[in-house]
């Protein structure tokens, strides 16, 4: 212990004697360690921490699977849910829920809330209890007894100010009075953010065996303790085989998905890739520090030689050097905690709400115990990594050379030069791998933005409405509201077009259903035609500027008293009527059927394809139905203006209020914002890796500059001799730059090989990572290689220029 304390005191004095040298190393380590700690805190909260439910590894999601339609996670119908709940042996409990959007009134301005209708055992299946009050009772899970709600902690605070007497208070939702029976714990969420919950209360019609095709539920189940996930899958596959012919077609099945996989999804990729990038940045920082310590060890050769002569063992010298390295890493780690804190704050502020609000664990990100332990461990590990090589080399001094009275303390052996050069090659190689990875993501994102979405998002304002069933029971009442609302909105100055539609491109809100085509019979084993459907008002296509290819748009004459009509998109037309016009042909959506009687609609127009699932999303056939012929309770209002559409928001709210003062509008945003939010995940990943790749390039350039600057210092005597013998400044500059660029070219060659392998591996194992650009895109590889060479040239030029200013007379007297 006394020896350790002695080494610590001596090491601290040595470091404080060179404050500039120490500050540079501590800052480099702080950046690397702090960035790693920040990303780890995110990974730890989102990926490594257990989900906030009881035994989360026993929870699974149950979905319906339609392989031919590429629908692996289709919703479940009420009769199917009851079948799984009552007939399966693998699960302790099976619960369900579905979205429930509701208008709240009587508490100030009308407001739209995002709710969920759930089975009474939903919370007990997850193993979560309300923080205040009680969960739902079984007898509340039926019509007439379901007028009770449980609030989220956030809604309780926001609307009721966190009142202690909240239980048994009432709240008016869609003109219906509900009794508040509980409040959930802070931060509780499942699948997405919800404001309040109510019992689902199926009607007898909904659970009828004839309603297996009415799929709208999410189902979560808890495995029994003695049942494995594979055993549950086997049971569900057997059950699917038994009921497939009775209730479903041949291309149907049941899928089980672990809840952790369901909730995290592709966020795992979005976090592990930056974590790998920032880990490489730390390696480059360690290589830089190792180079600086090698240079420092060279300057201390005489000191170490004297200590050796006086009896210090090699192990004692290595221990002293490692102690100094660990002191540096501890100081770097301490400062890295501050860097991590700042970086975490910036990450939380920069993460798009569309990601954070639906990611379990995001609100728990911070410098908790796990992050602190990680930071300490990384600090100690980096101290050993960057300190070991300099310590080993310093422990073997050339006693004869180092102890000469006139000997130059700055000389280095070939082996030490090779090590320093190898570290530079390593830095350059890693930096190029990161640059290529970031470059591919940038090019991929640019290609995404270049794809024509099939509509023009500029100058379009969107907002949502939902008409309460208590006030708008009949289709005629809903159609009348939409008609009057459009009249009011169109009267606002600056409005060019206005329309309602049930779905919004790239909003994540889509509806799909199978349909029949007159005269078309699917082949044996083939599913019926399937596509996305939308109910829209006549000006919808003009508002979104969706191209009319053939036929006509809807008009005001397409009402519930006129002939049923439909418009299809080009994808649907090309698939079922290749080489001919579909105008005048008939289609019928099965959700409009009255028993076995289909409601046939005449196709009156063909429009261009709209990429509703994003530029790189799957493409489905689409068909449109006039809103007046089938009004929907939930709709988007879209307004195209001649100027900034955001300026019209207040006027449009007032116009809606003129029609119904209790009707709120919500999620008001421009269409450009909708598209931007859809791409937020890819943009966020691209920005993260670009920042880290840029930091890696900077550190590699600094490392190369440090090596070349030190080389110039070490070779001052040689340079003086060369200049005395006739070498000009240009010769000296070329000599130094040649050495720096040689190291860079070797590092670039290694980096290109590494990037080639890693990008191909990522592209083959991670689907959807790149779009419109190959994993080995020549332009990206070549362009970023040239960028690296240009930065290296600058890093080599600065010390080379200094070398040309050496005075031969002074250099020849060097030491």
Image (cartoon, rainbow, N blue to C red):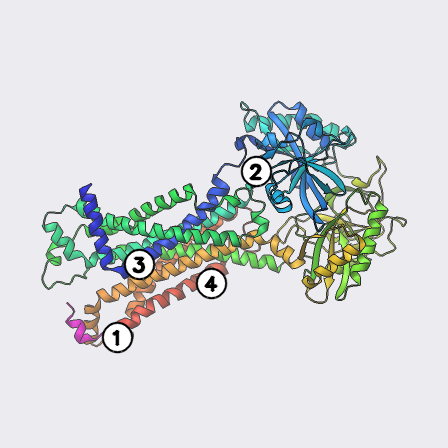
Given contact means CB atoms under 8 Å apart, are the residues at marks 3 and 2 in contact? no
Whichever of callouts 4 and 1 sits on the residue coming sooner in the sequence is 4
Q: Nearer the viewer, residue 748 or 398?
A: 398
How far apart, in angstroms, are the residues tagged by discs 1 and 3?
Answer: 28 Å
Whichever of callouts 4 and 3 sits on the residue coming sooner in the sequence is 3
For discs 3 and 2, the disc positioned in front in the rendered view = 2
Give residue 185's mark: 2
Give residue 805's mark: 1
How far apart, in angstroms, are the residues tagged by discs 4 and 3?
Answer: 35 Å
- Find residue 586 and report its horizontal and vertical position in percent: 84, 46
- Residue 781 as seen in the image, left or right of residue 703: right
Whichever of callouts 2 and 1 sits on the residue coming sooner in the sequence is 2
Whichever of callouts 3 and 2 sits on the residue coming sooner in the sequence is 3
Give residue 783's mark: 4
Provide the residue span drawn in magenta.
804-815
Q: Alpha-carbon neighbours of circle 2 within 10 Å: few (<14), some, or many (≥20)?
A: some
Within the magenta stretch, is there residue 189? no
Locate residue 407: give its quadrant: bottom left
């Amino acid at each position: 212990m006394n020896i350790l304390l002695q080494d610590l005191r001596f090491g601290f004095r040595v470091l404080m004697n060179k404050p500039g040298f120490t500050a540079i190393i501590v800052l480099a380590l702080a950046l690397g360690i702090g960035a790693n700690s920040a990303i780890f805190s995110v990974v730890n909260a989102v990926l490594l921490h257990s989900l906030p439910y009881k035994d989360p590894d026993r929870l699974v999601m149950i979905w319906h699977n339609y392989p031919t339609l590429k629908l692996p996670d289709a919703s479940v119908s009420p009769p199917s849910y009851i079948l799984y709940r009552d007939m399966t042996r693998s699960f302790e409990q099976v619960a369900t829920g579905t979205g429930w959007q509701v208008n709240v009134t009587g508490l100030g301005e009308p407001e739209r809330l995002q709710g969920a209708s759930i089975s009474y055992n939903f919370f007990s299946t997850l193993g979560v209890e309300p923080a205040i009050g009680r969960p739902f009772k079984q007898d509340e899970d039926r019509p007439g007894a379901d007028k009770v709600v449980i609030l989220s902690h956030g809604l309780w605070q926001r609307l009721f100010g966190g009142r202690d007497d909240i239980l048994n208070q009432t709240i008016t939702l869609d003109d219906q009075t509900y009794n508040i029976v509980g409040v959930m714990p802070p931060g509780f969420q499942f699948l997405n953010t919800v404001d309040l919950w109510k019992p689902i209360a199926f009607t007898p019609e909904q659970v009828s065996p004839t309603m297996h095709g009415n799929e709208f539920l999410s189902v979560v189940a808890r495995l029994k303790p003695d049942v494995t996930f594979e055993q549950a899958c086997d049971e569900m596959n057997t059950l699917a085989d038994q009921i497939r012919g009775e209730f479903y077609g041949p291309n149907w099945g049941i899928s089980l998905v672990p809840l952790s996989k369901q909730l995290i999804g592709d966020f795992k990729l979005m976090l592990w890739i930056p974590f790998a990038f920032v880990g490489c940045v730390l390696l480059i920082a360690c290589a830089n520090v190792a180079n600086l310590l090698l240079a420092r060890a060279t300057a201390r050769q005489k000191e170490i030689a004297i200590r050796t002569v006086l009896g210090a063992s090699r192990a004692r010298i290595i221990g002293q050097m490692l102690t100094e390295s660990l002191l540096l890493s501890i100081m770097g780690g301490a400062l890295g905690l501050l860097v991590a804190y700042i970086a975490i704050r910036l990450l939380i502020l920069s993460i798009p709400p569309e990601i954070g609000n639906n990611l379990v664990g995001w609100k728990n990100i911070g410098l908790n115990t796990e992050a602190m332990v990680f930071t300490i461990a990384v600090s100690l590990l980096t101290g050993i990594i960057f300190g070991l090589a300099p310590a080993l080399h310093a422990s073997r001094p050339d006693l004869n050379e180092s102890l000469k009275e006139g000997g130059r303390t700055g000389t280095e052996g070939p082996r030490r030069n090779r090590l320093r050069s190898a570290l530079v090659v390593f830095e350059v190689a890693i930096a190029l791998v990161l640059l290529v990875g970031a470059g591919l993501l940038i090019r991929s994102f640019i290609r995404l933005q270049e794809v024509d979405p099939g509509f023009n998002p500029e100058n379009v304002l969107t907002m949502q409405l939902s008409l309460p069933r208590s006030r708008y029971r009949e289709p005629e009442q809903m159609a009348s509201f939409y008609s009057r609302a459009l009249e009011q909105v169109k009267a606002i100055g600056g409005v060019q077009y206005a329309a309602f539609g049930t779905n919004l491109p790239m909003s994540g809100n889509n509806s799909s259903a199978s349909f029949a085509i007159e005269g078309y019979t699917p082949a044996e084993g083939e599913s019926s035609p399937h596509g996305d459907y939308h109910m829209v008002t006549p000006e919808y296509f003009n508002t979104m500027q969706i191209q009319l290819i053939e036929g006509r748009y809807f008009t005001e004459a397409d009402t519930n008293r006129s002939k049923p009509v439909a418009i299809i998109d080009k994808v649907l037309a090309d698939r079922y009527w290749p080489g001919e016009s579909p105008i005048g042909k008939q289609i019928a959506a099965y959700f409009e059927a009255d028993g076995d009687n289909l409601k046939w609609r005449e196709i009156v127009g063909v429009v261009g394809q709209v990429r509703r699932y994003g530029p790189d999303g799957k493409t489905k056939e689409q068909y449109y139905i006039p809103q007046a012929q089938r009004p929907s309770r939930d709709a988007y209002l879209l307004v195209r203006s001649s100027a900034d559409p955001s300026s019209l928001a207040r006027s449009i709210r007032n116009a809606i209020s003129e029609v119904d003062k209790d009707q709120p509008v919500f999620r008001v945003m421009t269409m450009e914002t909708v598209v931007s939010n859809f791409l937020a995940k890819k943009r966020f990943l691209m920005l993260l890796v670009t920042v880290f790749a840029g930091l890696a390039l900077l550190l590699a350039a600094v490392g190369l500059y440090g090596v070349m600057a030190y080389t110039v210092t070490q070779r001052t005597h040689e340079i003086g001799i060369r200049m005395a013998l006739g070498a000009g400044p240009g010769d000296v500059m070329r000599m130094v730059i040649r050495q720096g660029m040689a190291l860079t070219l070797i590092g670039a060659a290694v980096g290109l090989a590494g990037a080639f392998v890693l990008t191909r591996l990522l592209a083959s194992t991670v689907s959807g990572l790149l779009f419109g650009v190959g994993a080995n895109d020549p332009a990206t590889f070549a362009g970023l290689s040239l960028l690296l060479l240009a930065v290296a040239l600058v890093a080599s030029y600065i010390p080379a220029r200094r070398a040309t200013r050496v005075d031969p007379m002074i250099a020849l007297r060097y030491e």
